[in-house]
Image: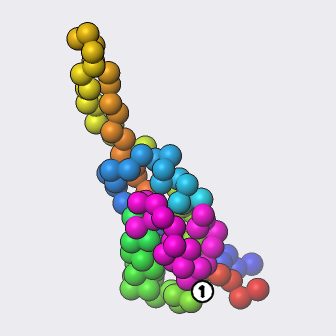
Amino acid sequence: MEATIQREARAHARYVRIAPRKVRIVINLVRGKPVKEALDILKFVPKRASRVVEKLIRSAVANATHNHEMDEARLFIEQAYVNEGPVMKRVRPEMRGQAFPILKRMSHVTVVLRERGEG
């Protein structure tokens, strides 16, 4: 009984200055799709996070082809997820001496690519 070894290529974008909930909207559009289709989708998504995700997918494709010698045409996005990064805390002065907090959130984005099987 042979064990099939599944190779995967990863790419991480850390400390991205976009809130995780905004990046998740874009990530959910491309998860599970072939790389070519995902890049075509991201080209027309009018969100700032789409540029970050597109660059990250291209980086993962470069890792797959260069480091693992995978076929670019058979790659698909197996996993794509966003974790929360650190939060910068700022204060906005308001009337009557009050101060309201502003939370500037960051994201850690990860993309994992695999090759489609023959069947």
* Colour style of the rendered protein structure: rainbow
Residue at (42% x, 77% y) in the render: 58
Circle 1 is placed at which residue position?
Answer: 74
Q: Is residue 12 visible?
A: no
Provide the secondary structure element on which disc 1 rests: helix
Residue nearest the observer in this picture, 69 or 55: 55
21 vs 110: above or below: above
What is the span of residues highlighted in magenta in the rendered image? 29-51
Residue at (60% x, 64% y) in the render: 29
Image quarter of residue 64: bottom left
Work out which quarter of the rendered image holds the C terminus and state it.
Answer: bottom right
The crowding category of the residue bearing disc 1, from other C-alpha atoms within 10 Å (few below 14, some 14 to 19, many at least 20), is some
Residue 51 appears at what percent x and percent y? Answer: 40, 67
* Magenta segment main secondary structure: helix
Q: Residue 104: within the magenta?
A: no
**Does residue 93 appear to the left or right of 82 in the view shown?**
left
Residue 91 appears at what percent x and percent y? Answer: 25, 26
Work out which quarter of the rendered image holds the N terminus and state it.
Answer: bottom right
